[in-house]
Structures are given as C-alpha cells and as structure tokens.
Amino acid sequence: MGNRIYERAQMIHLQIRNYSELYRIRIFIVQIWWSLLDGRAHCDDCGLAQAEASHSIVSKPKTAQTKDTMFGTRHWIADGGLASTLQNLGYSVDGDPLWSARLLATDPNAIKRVHKTFLEAKADMVTTASYQASISGFVKHLSITDEEAVKLMTLSVSLAREAVNEYCRENQKEGEKPLVVGSVGPYGACQADGSEYTGDYVSKMTEEQLKVWHRPRMTALVDAGVDLLAIETIPALKEALAVLRLLKEFPGMKAWVTFSCRDGQRTNFGDPFGEAARKCHEEAPDQLAAVGVNCSPPQHVSSLLKEANVTLPAPEVLPRVVYPNSGEEWVAGKGWEGRSTEWSYVTEVPSWLRLGATVVGGCCRIGPADIRDIASIVAKSPSL
C-alpha cells in the first residue's frame, strides 16, 4: 500500500504546478502515511482519488500528525516585556542605545531574575535579552572588542537557560522544559531612533546589507544553543525575507516571524499583513515554526489574525503567534507613553484563541502579572 501511495503522490506532483496547492497535497500525504504506520488506515486509496479529482485539499487537517512538531499540539504562553519589567525593578533602560541589553554587561543577574519571574507566571518560554543587541552596537557603546561582544550575546542565551534550569529544579518540574527563544530584533531597533516602528530604513538598504548586519547576532545565538529564533517586531516584508533567507544558513534552526503593525491590515512599513505572512511561509516553509504579530496595539490583533487566515494554511499546519504591547506609543528618546486605562488587554485573548492563535504572550509594558492572567484564560480555553 505504501508503494501505491508513493506512486500516486508522484503523479500528483507532476500534475500540480501551483506551489501552495502542492504544499497542501504534501501535508495530506504525510497525514495518510502516519495513519498507515499507526494502523488507522482502512481503505486502499485512502482518499487520494479525491485529491486527484479536485486538486484542492481541505486546509484544516483531521489528525494531529500534520501539526507542527514545535507548537501545533497545544497552546503556549510566551513571556512579556523584559525591559519594562526591568524598569519596574528600578533599572533605567529607555533612551539607552542598548536598551535592556546593557545589563548583560552591567547586571546580568537582573536579567535572569526577570526570566524566572515570567516562568513563575506560567510562561512556557523566555526570550533572550538580545532584541536591541548587535555586535557592532556592543563594540560602539561598551568600548569592547568583537570577541567580547560575541561573549555578551552568548551570555544572553546562558542566562535564559540558567533561569529555565533553576526554575525547573526549584519547582521540581520534570519532562518538557520551557523554551529558550533567541530574540532577533529588526535593524531599526539597534539604531535607537524608533525606526523599527516605521521601517523607513529598508528603502535605503539592500537585502544583502540586511543579511550582513543580522548574520553575527544570529550566528552567536544559534551557536549558543537557543531552541528557536524569534524574528520579531519586523516592520517590513523586505527585512523579514532577508532574515529568513539568512536563516537557511542554519538548516537545523527554526524561527517564528512576527511583524509590528500600524493597524489591522498593514505592517508598520505599509505591507499588507496577510500577503507578508504568506510570502514568509513560501520563503521558508520548513524552518518557519509560526508567524504572527508582536509589539503592536492589541486592539488590532484580531483583524490581523483574520488577514492571516485568508492567506495561510490552517493554524494546525502553520501556528500563529501573537504578543502585542500594551497599546501605548513609543516616543524615541523617552520610551512608552499613553497607556489607556479604559481598555483591558486580556479581554481580547479568547478572541485571539478562536482565530487560531497558538502562542500568546506580551511585549512592551506587559509584565508578569499580565502573563499570569493570560495563562489563566488560556488554561480555561478549549485545547487544540
């Protein structure tokens, strides 16, 4: 039976030219193959005749085997804003060109304490303090060598890993451990001028220039052993595609891509969000663990998820990740201003889950208490 399935799959491969249709056929074939292996197949053709007849497979798979192995089997809780939580502890980071990454050199234990605080708030992962970090930035603002800068980037991963291990040991957690996610912020973040919220710089840079700039940090994070990369707060499709093409230099590593968006339809640079998400998926289908939105006003997330659901495979195939900010506005040189007292962040979480969000957390100005509230809501929601 396995040979017949393979032969029929080859016929379909030759017949179908459209990439997205071919991708869904491949997903369907994997579903059938696993059914054969676990004894649940009860028919000779296993539905492939229907696939040949229509060249269109229902986008939502019926079995768990087709789900992404990293996020597709349950809901996950991401952490919140590292820098804003450090601020609440008395550290001054806004206006600093290195932002929270400076503490890698001045007070690394503070970063580890915040990681553990988010884990205690039921986060399933912690994100490294490398968002606004770059090798060149460390060299310039700390007056250190390239080698010392790489060590600081590596330290961001070590601190997150130590926090995970200490949390698991202190709470007698066995089995699956929280993930260590390497933060890959946009080029604009490291300019410390707020341009990550406009993306204007992408018009002045080539794809190769973007790749050259991102490569040292990505190399350091991967070499240090992150479980996943978060290509996050990306304002423009051009930069997202450049980083995903760079990701192919690290074939064993997966990543999610999240865009920063100005409204419910477009990225901060103005790209249609749904199309941007689709092109990311097409660029790196084997390495893209999830796609979504972060550091954007939470009231836009539901609309953005709807846009993604039109252009992407079902969330069971390509998970969605959302971790917006508190809805405030970033003012370069000052920080976040204008938090609304009339709008509750957590009231939107059930809607995000219904629209397919698999990973839910927070970004700037979302602290451990908020993450605990989100985790409580997710725990009461239907499982995937």
Image: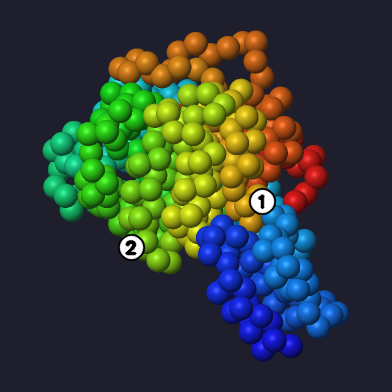
330 in relation to 103, above or below: above
Residue 377, picture quadrant: top right
* Residue 135 % position (x, y): 22, 45
Q: Earlier in the sequence, mark 1 or mark 2?
A: 2
User: Can I make out residue 222 in this image?
Assistant: yes
| Residue 314: mark | 1
Residue bearing the label numbered 2: 249
Residue drawn at x 41%, y 19% as measured from the top left: 330
Residue 109, picture quadrant: top left
Instruction: List the single residue furthest toward the right.
Output: 42
| Residue 202: mark | none
Residue drawn at x 58%, y 71% as measured from the top left: 15
* Residue 89 % position (x, y): 46, 25
Label 2 SS: loop
Residue drawn at x 74%, y 39% as measured from the top left: 354
Q: Label 2 amino acid?
A: Glu
State the residue in front, 327 or 241: 241
Dot 1, how many residues are within 10 Å of its Cα: few (below 14), some (14-19), or many (20+)? some
Q: Are marks 1 and 2 in contact (CB under 8 Å)?
A: no
Q: In the shown orientation, is residue 384 left or right of residue 327? A: right
Dot 2, how many residues are within 10 Å of its Cα: few (below 14), some (14-19), or many (20+)? few
